[in-house]
């Protein structure tokens, strides 16, 4: 996703607390974004379906239809499956972060947060989305990879384990494809952020760890292919 060059990015903010919603909308509009603020999940989904935005800022703890269900819906629809989602939560427990990123959120920010921090994350995510639409570079590795029970097709954005398809978020897919196309090589978290998520992105080291845990869970019988090198980072086993 990401806005086209010269186009104002459209952002949908779904937050049920009026003061927080107004603060977020105001500060994003000051930065020149086209912003729609919505107070509940059902209206949020309707707005996203009406005109898919360039990014969604989504509160986790919404009454009725919560942020996880909205995120699942966004990822399930072909028109919105690649829209970046920044999840906002009052909970900072790692289990909540794992759950949110596992449902397809691209990043998270915990309340209370400063408008400056949120704006930095939004801009970084939009830059990342613009880069993801570009043609892969020569260093991005082959489009198709088959190792043991695992097969990856970058052109189709498809992962199969024992010939059974498994759904991965955009960030999870990029991480898995990058590691699988560089088997045996150890990458630090900073290297993965720079190579997979993009230079200048505001992403915590812990986000990488959360994405890796989610990848392993989805890999099932092939989970041990992604190995942790303690004190360094991660590598994909070279058989």
Image: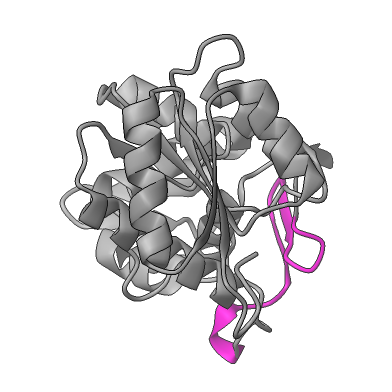
Q: Is residue 199 magenta?
A: no
The front one of 232 and 215 is 215
Name the residue: 31% across, 70% down. Answer: 191
Q: Does residue 162 show up?
A: no
Counting from the top left corner in percent of width and height, residue 148 is at: 68, 50
Residue 136 falls left or right of residue 183 = right
The quarter of the rendered structure image containing the N terminus is bottom right
The front one of 238 and 12 is 12
Counting from the top left corner in percent of width and height, residue 5 is at: 61, 84
Q: Does residue 57 show up?
A: yes
Name the residue: 33% across, 33% down. Answer: 20
The front one of 14 and 97 is 14
Q: Which residue lies most toward the bottom here?
A: 138
Quadrant of residue 9 within the rendered picture: bottom right
Counting from the top left corner in percent of width and height, residue 188 is at: 27, 63
Residue 188 falls left or right of residue 71 = left
Task: Specify the segment rendered in magenta.
Answer: 138-157
Counting from the top left corner in percent of width and height, residue 167 is at: 71, 40
Residue 200 falls left or right of residue 78 = left
Q: Is residue 147 above or below residue 230?
A: below
Q: Is residue 5 above or below residue 16?
A: below
Q: Which residue lies most toward the top here?
A: 64
Asked which colour scheme the image uses, the reply is one colour
How many numbered badges does the structure rendering display?
0
Name the residue: 61% across, 54% down. Answer: 170
Q: Is residue 63 above or below residue 179?
A: above
The quarter of the rendered structure image containing the C terminus is bottom right
Q: Is residue 155 magenta?
A: yes
Name the residue: 57% across, 72% down. Answer: 8
The front one of 36 and 62 is 36
């Amino acid at each position: 996703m990401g806005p086209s060059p010269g186009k104002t990015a459209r952002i949908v903010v779904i937050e049920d607390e009026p003061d927080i919603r107004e603060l977020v909308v105001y500060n994003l509009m000051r930065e020149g974004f086209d912003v729609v603020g919505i107070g509940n999940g059902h209206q949020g989904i309707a707005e996203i379906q009406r005109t898919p935005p360039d990014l969604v800022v989504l509160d986790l703890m919404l009454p009725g239809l919560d942020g996880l269900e909205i995120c699942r819906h966004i990822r399930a629809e072909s028109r919105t499956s690649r829209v970046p989602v920044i999840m906002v939560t009052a909970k900072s427990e790692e289990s909540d972060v794992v759950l949110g990123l596992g449902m397809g959120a691209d990043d998270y920010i915990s309340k209370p947060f400063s408008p400056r921090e949120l704006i930095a994350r939004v801009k970084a995510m939009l830059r990342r989305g613009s880069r993801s639409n570009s043609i892969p570079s020569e260093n991005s590795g082959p489009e198709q990879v088959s190792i043991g029970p695992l097969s990856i097709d970058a052109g189709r954005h498809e992962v199969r384990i024992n010939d059974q398809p498994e759904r991965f978020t955009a960030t999870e897919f990029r991480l898995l494809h990058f590691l699988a196309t560089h088997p045996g090589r150890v990458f630090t978290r900073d290297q993965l952020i720079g190579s997979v998520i993009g230079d200048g992105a505001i992403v915590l080291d812990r986000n990488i760890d959360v994405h890796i845990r989610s990848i392993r869970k989805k890999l099932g019988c092939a989970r041990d292919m992604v190995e942790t090198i303690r004190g360094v980072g991660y590598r994909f086993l070279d058989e």
